């Protein structure tokens, strides 16, 4: 798996089985993550949004676990809307 949620550069907070994570990431890291998740499960899809590109899937019409690529980081949240609560790495 790409650098997401791995190593000392990642900040994570846990709460009732929900995971909010971020990690610095390049476009290659993002493309590797997309390839990994979409290769064996057609339920995963990407879509553009105001903060970047989402990799997500829906259960019963509702967004579930979602990754967001902001151009220099990947954010993970339990839902697409919850990615708004994750700020990500500090600006350089």
Image: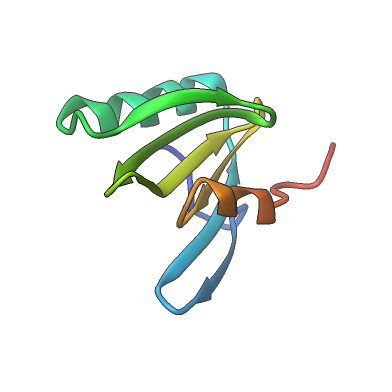
Instruction: Report the colour scheme.
Output: rainbow
Q: Residue at x 73, y 50 (%)?
A: 87
- When the figure is inspected, residue 56 is found, relative to residue 60, above or below; the finding is above
Q: Is residue 10 left or right of residue 2?
A: right
Residue with the most extreme bottom position: 16
Q: Nearer the viewer, residue 12 or 19?
A: 19
- When the figure is inspected, residue 32 is found, relative to residue 20, above or below; the finding is above
Q: Residue 9 at x, y = what percent?
A: 62, 52
Q: Quadrant of the C terminus?
A: top right
Q: Nearer the viewer, residue 49 or 91?
A: 49
Residue with the most extreme left position: 40
Residue 75 appears anywhere in the view: yes
Q: Residue 79 at x, y = what percent?
A: 47, 52
Residue 1 appears anywhere in the view: no
Q: Residue 10 at x, y = what percent?
A: 59, 55
Q: Residue at x 30, y 24 (%)?
A: 35
Q: Nearer the viewer, residue 56 or 12?
A: 56
Residue with the most extreme right position: 92
Q: Is residue 40 left or right of residue 82?
A: left
Q: Quadrant of the N terminus?
A: top left
């Amino acid at each position: 798996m790409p650098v997401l949620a791995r190593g000392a550069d990642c900040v994570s907070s846990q709460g009732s089985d929900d995971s909010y994570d971020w990690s610095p990431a390049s476009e290659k890291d993002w493309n590797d993550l997309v390839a990994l998740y979409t290769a064996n499960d057609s339920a995963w899809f990407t879509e553009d949004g105001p903060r970047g590109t989402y990799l997500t899937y829906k259960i019963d019409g509702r967004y579930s676990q979602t990754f967001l690529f902001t151009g220099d980081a990947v954010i993970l949240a339990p839902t697409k809307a919850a990615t708004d609560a994750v700020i990500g790495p500090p600006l350089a």
